[in-house]
């Protein structure tokens, strides 16, 4: 089953949005496979956001993501990568649709509450970057049949 990497950024933790975001993903029917609170190091941040290394906002981005604790998670489900991207909304929270996480809870591009992998390849790379294999839990839920058809 498809898995994606999701991170509640330091602003989401500071603004007490952990339960709200986890709750939305749970209620959608996605399955939580791993979860931990982390303090992202500068090295990890630079590796995670390597594709943005040349962008003018890179230093600000690394500074922000390392500014406080974050919550790293792996969520699993049918089409999980794109489903989570749609639930997050556009990168710029001012343009993100109402009903999405960024559309409902953020205003500023730099503080947009949540990260989600943008492709299957990114998901695989980011899961490996943030988690050891033994941190992923494989289990069955009684509701799986009702959710996944
Ligand atoms: P994404 O998080 O929706 O995948 P990306 O383009 O991968 O968006 O950018 C990574 C993060 O960098 C964004 O979530 C946002 O916090 C930040 N960011 C993107 N573009 C800008 C910008 O123009 N100014 C400041 N921060 C930006
Ligand atoms: Mg991205």
Image (tube, helix red, strand yellow):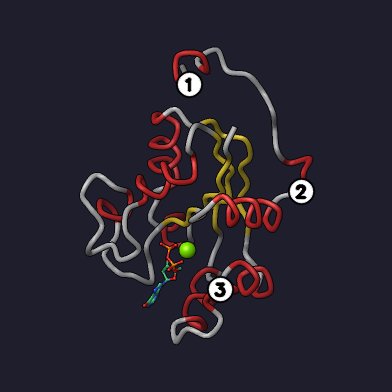
* Pair 2/3: label in front: 3
Q: Residue at x 57, y 45 (%)?
A: 73
8 sits to left or right of 41: left
- Label 3, label 1: how many angstroms apart (C-alpha)? 33 Å
Q: Residues within 10 Å of mark 2 (few under 14, many from 20)?
A: few
Q: Element type at marker 1?
A: helix
Residue 93 vertical placement versus 20 (above, below):
below
- Residue picked out by circle 3: 51
Q: For disc 1, does the CB lie below 8 Å from ligand 1?
A: no
Q: For disc 3, does the CB lie below 8 Å from ligand 1?
A: yes
Q: Residue at x 38, y 55 (%)?
A: 15
- Residue picked out by circle 1: 148
Q: Element type at marker 2?
A: loop
Residue 75 vertical placement versus 111 (above, below):
above
* Pair 2/1: label in front: 1
- Residue 100 % position (x, y): 29, 47
- Residue 146 % position (x, y): 45, 14
- Image quadrant where one finds the N terminus: top right
Q: Quadrant of ligand 1?
A: bottom left
């Amino acid at each position: 089953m498809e898995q994606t990497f999701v991170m509640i950024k330091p602003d989401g933790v500071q603004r007490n949005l952990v339960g709200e975001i986890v709750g939305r993903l749970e209620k959608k029917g996605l399955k939580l496979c791993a979860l931990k609170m982390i303090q992202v190091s500068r090295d990890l941040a630079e590796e995670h956001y390597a594709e943005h290394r040349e962008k003018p906002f890179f230093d600000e981005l690394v500074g922000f993501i390392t500014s406080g604790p974050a919550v790293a998670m792996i969520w699993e489900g049918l089409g999980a990568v794109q489903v989570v991207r749609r639930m997050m909304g556009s990168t710029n929270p001012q343009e993100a649709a109402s009903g999405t996480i960024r559309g409902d809870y953020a205003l500023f591009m730099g503080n947009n509450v949540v990260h989600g992998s943008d492709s299957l390849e990114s998901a695989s790379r980011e899961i490996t970057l943030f988690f050891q294999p033994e941190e992923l839990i494989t289990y069955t839920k009684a509701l799986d049949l009702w959710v996944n058809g």
